[in-house]
Amino acid sequence: MSLVKRGNVWWDYVWRDGVRHAKSTGTGNRRRAEIIARQFRDELNDIRHRVPQRNPDMTVGALAARFIADGMAKPHALDRLNHLLPFFADLRVCDITPARVREYRQERHREKAIKEATVNRDLSVLRRLLYWAVEEGLLAVNPLTRLHMERERRVKRPVMSLREERLLVAMAPEHLRRIIRCALDTGMRRGEILGERWEDIDFDNRILHVTRSKTPEGEARDIPLTSALYETLLAIRRDQGPVFTYQGDAIKIVKTAWASSLRRAGLRHFRFHDLRHTANTRMMLAGVLQEVRREILGHTSRRSRDMNDRYIQIELPEKRDAIRKLEAWLASQAAALGAEAAQQQGAQPPTTTTQPEKEVPDEKSNDQ
């Protein structure tokens, strides 16, 4: 070990690949200088063999920049980072502690009235970022490995009734009506619907192919078309291009049209995603098995699966049977709704016109 004392400080000199490297150990203690020199040589050796260098002093902002540059950040992570970085950006990774996380949680609640589930989503992205740093060799351990997440309350998911559906469709513009029909009859996500192209629809076999989804389970699944959706799409059929358009341009967002339609229909608050829950509920009421519903919805999550699911293969005939059950259930509900409306009209009493009473002259006035 080439340690040279210059003044009161030991220096380490190392040759690597014909290059002389010098580093001050910053100490006059020989034994401590040897430990620092050994670490210095290990670092040079790691660099020589391209071993990732651990850098716990890196800020969270710099780490997030590398995370995004490597293409690891999905849209959900990018959205969560918009909330995380203002608080954590200038903090060193090695300074992240559960106490800091509690401060962040309190800060988020002070800024806005949000649910614990929202903050949990933020922190799950932060934890994923730190796990990525460990995988890349930038950190030895993830300081948030055993981070405690707050318990989340179960969220109420409203289901749209057939009466509410009719009111909404009656008040919605034409381009939104087609999107609503697709959502209710297939259970597809909004992004899947808006990303659908004519090339993905098989009119001969009445099958819609989902090729763009946010989950691996959602992609490459086939959904049989209901008669209503088939007729809707057949009326505007094209050879190629996006299926759902407005004035010739592909539709990217429906937020404004959706909110306006709900307001005009006088309905309670619904999210567009609630149409997906409605489709799932309707198929359940129609007697469609859970495994078949999952395949149609592309909702095969690990949390909802059991060990037997991996041996169950749902084929197209089962899906077609599920759609037939859904159509039969919708027809029965529509008939019941029509009968109820007719009964209410028949129960109203007939309107009769009454003749106004004739004035009776006041006897006292006649006497006068």
Image (tube, rainbow, N blue to C red):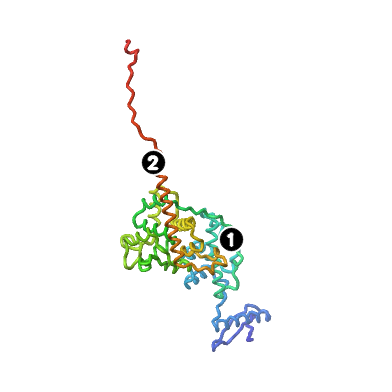
Q: Which mark is residue 72?
A: none
Question: Residue 205 lies in what quarter of the image?
Answer: bottom left
Q: Verify CB contact (< 8 Å) between mark 2 and mark 1.
A: no
Question: How far across and down, in percent of the image, does residue 348 sit?
Answer: 39, 38
Upstream in sequence: badge 2 or badge 1: 1
Looking at the image, residue 159 sits to the left or right of residue 356; the answer is right
Position of 1 relative to 186 (above/below):
below
Residue type of the residue flagged with mark 1? Met
Position of 249 relative to 329 (above/below):
below
Question: How far across and down, in percent of the image, does residue 104 sit?
Answer: 56, 60
Classify 10 Å Cα crowding around label 2: few (below 14), some (14-19), many (20 and above): few
Q: Which residue is mark 2?
A: 345
- Of residue 40 and residue 120, the one placed in the foreground of this image is 120
Question: Residue 320 lies in what quarter of the image?
Answer: bottom left
Looking at the image, residue 42 sits to the left or right of residue 270; the answer is right
Q: Which residue is mark 1?
A: 149
